[in-house]
Image (tube, rainbow, N blue to C red):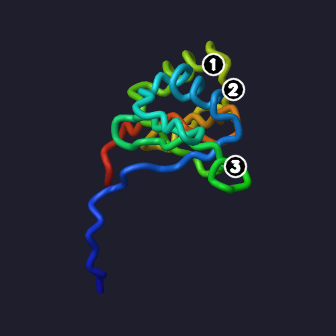
Amino acid sequence: MSAATDVSGVDFVTVFVKDYPAAVEFYGGTLGLEHSVDYGKIPAGEFETGSLTLQVMDAASVGREFEPSTHPIALHVADVAATREKLEAAGVSFHGETIDSGVCHMAIFSDPDGNTLMLHHRYAPRGA
């Protein structure tokens, strides 16, 4: 039995941070994501990935205690090795070697506040 729903997608995911200016530099500068909106009234804004908006927000500005997320956001790239090399050259440290799962490549790293992110590329078709 399935429940009726009007959900047709996911618009954004929130990434809480402690240092919003450092996050702006990292997500916009280091990762090269489009900084589409800056809220102004609170230290928060939006960054575009192409398929999902990252709402980056100072946790304290909305009464939240900051804790870094350990659940990675998988950022799609065409070539994990090449993108990893560029990010390492920019000073980003990765957590271990690149993983080959048999269907995709994954390389895990963190933003300046410790939120876990991942470079991801599926090279095998789903269901293969």
Does residue 96 appear anywhere in the picture? no
Which residue is denoted by mark 1 in the rendering?
88
* 62 in relation to 87, above or below: below
Q: Residues within 10 Å of mark 3 (few under 14, many from 20)?
A: some
Circle 2: element type: loop
Mark 1 vs mark 3: in front: 3
In percent of the image, x 62 and y 53: which residue is there? 62
Tag 3 residue: 60
Give the residue type at disc 1.
Answer: Glu
Q: Amino acid at mark 2?
A: Ser
Q: Residue furthest top?
A: 89
Q: Is residue 27 left or right of residue 5?
A: right
Mark number, residue 93: 2
Crowding at dot 1, Cα within 10 Å, few <14 / some 14-19 / many 20+, comes out as few
Contact, mark 2 vs mark 1 (Cβ under 8 Å) = yes
Left of 56 or right of it: where is 114? right
Which is more toward the observer, 92 or 60? 60
Distance of label 2 from label 3 (alpha carbons):
26 Å
* Residue located 63% across and 18% down the image: 88
Q: Quadrant of residue 125?
A: top left
Residue at (40% x, 31% y) in the render? 36
x then y, percent, for residue 70: 66, 50
**Where residue 71 sits: x, y (%)?**
60, 51
Q: Amino acid at mark 3?
A: Ala
State the residue at coordinates (57%, 37%): 99
